[in-house]
Image (cartoon, grey):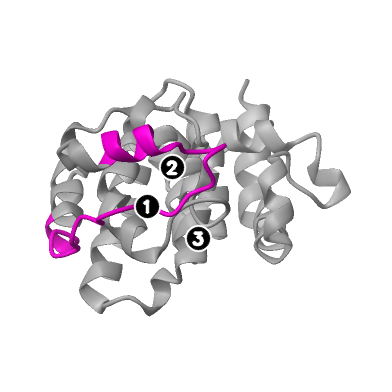
Amino acid sequence: MNTPEALDRVYQAFSTQKKPRTISACPCCIDQAHVCTLLSTPLRKITPAQLSSYASSVFLTAGSEPDFRYFLPRILEISIHDRGWWPDREIVLRSLALAGWKSWHKGEREVLQSLFDSAFNDVISCEEDQEYEIDSWICGLALAGVDVAPFLQKLEAHAATEALIGFFELNAADLPKKRLGNAFWSDNKEAAAQVVEWFESSAIQSIVWRHYGST
């Protein structure tokens, strides 16, 4: 399944979530005019700029689980396609954990997992900012409470060697200190330790040494 198809399935799965009548928010973060714009604009047509404040504030100074579920498909769509969008992808995916998504209906969890798989596959096959994209996804998924082991395994595949090396180089300076470069890892040190251990495994070290030995 490709990413557009996976996104459509997410929209469909959450289509029963009613549009909220209002959004509870700190007026310093989201004023009433902004709320009106969000609620009067068709979901798929909400712009990145319009949704930025809500997505970066939800569960902190704005929003609740019902309105988050309503906006979630559009939030994920923008986060996947607009790398420069604020909030960072790590913040977006962390919001899923704050929403308690692991307790949602099985079908909803499954379509989200399928979207993560498809989007990550796209990142592995795309050369532009590949190492930063991989780093963002691995960290963000960990913050969402997703098991990152299957995603790390994708990087071990022969066709993904360059992606793995880029991810390694992005973290190489921090690995001797048993940590990773992305500051968001401080929110899930257990998962960070898992990734550090993966980098230190004989399989990954072998791939790294073969790469540098052939250059």
Q: Is residue 110 above or below residue 141?
A: below
Q: Nearer the viewer, residue 67 or 192?
A: 67
Residue 123, by quadrant, is top left
Magenta stretch, main secondary structure class: loop
Say which label, 1 or 3, has the lower sequence index: 1
Amino acid at pointer 2: Tyr
Measured as percent of width and height from the top left, residue 189 is found at 73, 61
Measured as percent of width and height from the top left, residue 165 is found at 58, 34
The residue that mark 2 highlights is 54
Q: Is residue 37 left or right of residue 6?
A: right
Let me know if residue 15 is in the magenta part: yes
Amino acid at pointer 3: Ala
Q: Are marks 2 and 1 in contact (CB under 8 Å)?
A: yes
Measured as percent of width and height from the top left, residue 168 is found at 65, 38
**Which residue corresponds to the image point at 31% horizontal and 53% vertical from the top-left?**
22
The residue that mark 3 highlights is 144
Q: Is residue 178 left or right of residue 67?
A: right
